[in-house]
Image (tube, helix red, strand yellow):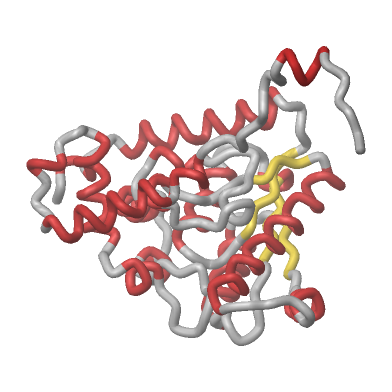
Amino acid sequence: MSKFLILNYDAIIREITGFISKQVKSRKKNGLVIGLSGGLDSSVCLILATKSVEPSKITGLIMPEKGLTPKKDINNARDLAKEMKINYKEIHFEHAKKTLLKRLPNSKLSSGNFSARLRMALLYHYAYINNLLVLGTSDKSELMIGYFTKFGDRAADMLPLGVVYKSQVKLLARHLGLSEQIVNQPSSPRFWKGHTAEKEIGLSYNEIDNILQSYENNDLINCKQSKGKIKLVSDMIRKSQHKREHIPILNPLRESAVHERGTSK
């Protein structure tokens, strides 16, 4: 096992649950709303959430897409919601998506990103109505390489898994007692049939995380992965930088723009 995977997972749980609880209290919210996909990250987030606030203050939104979301994902999400004794709702948005995209140019990837943004809109709609915080589920690996939809699944009021790599999330899941079925399920945003993250990226998360750990430590020269794999991950980090940055704002205005009257023709 790689050294960076050997962590005090009890301490990590305390840190994350304390963080979630503090966010809810300090921002004077009634609780949390979380999107439940039936996958690893959202399942781990839900378990941690129930250790942070009362389960009655948590709502899970299950938002499957017909033809793309496997039945087992829906069942996983339902079963865990029931086990954790939280409120949950199922929302199907295929008709709305089809109507909205009917007259617009489209592609396989843009359609998937559109679904992620629709889910984000539903979460924030529900959060606003009920004075809740949106609990994001992206992990550190996804955030670093930009494997998320801008203003989609990364849009959240907090990202508690943003401090742990995907490989670490798997070990954390086992520590929390999550079923092996969910732990071993290939990560996928379900943008198209048969879609998996590792297949799309071309690397396993073990390889990605090994490179990311070396990247963070400024020690890529000693990374055991091939130069080609290191370049692939480094390029993903560089090309996705705009996803992690704050939106640029023109500030301040030039003095001439403030004090000089413009002329119109």
Residue in the picture at 68% in, 77% down: 105
Residue 35 quadrant: bottom right
Task: Indicate the position of residue 62 as horizontal and vertical percent values.
Answer: 67, 66
38 above or below 144? below
The residue sitting at 58% across, 44% down in the picture is 49
Q: Is residue 37 left or right of residue 28?
A: left
Question: Residue 38's spot in the image, x, y percent?
Answer: 53, 67
The image quarter containing residue 140 is top left
**Extreme-front residue of the structure:** 265
| 216, 15: nearer the viewer | 216
Asked whether, in this view, residue 96 is left or right of residue 135, the answer is right
- Residue found at x 63% / y 51%: 151
Residue in view at x 20 percent, y 33 percent:
218
Asked which quadrant contains residue 103, the reply is bottom right
Quarter in which the C terminus is drawn: top right
Seen from the viewer's position, the closer of residues 9 and 222 is 222
Left or right of 168? Residue 258 is right
* Vertical placement of residue 73 versus 50, above or below: below
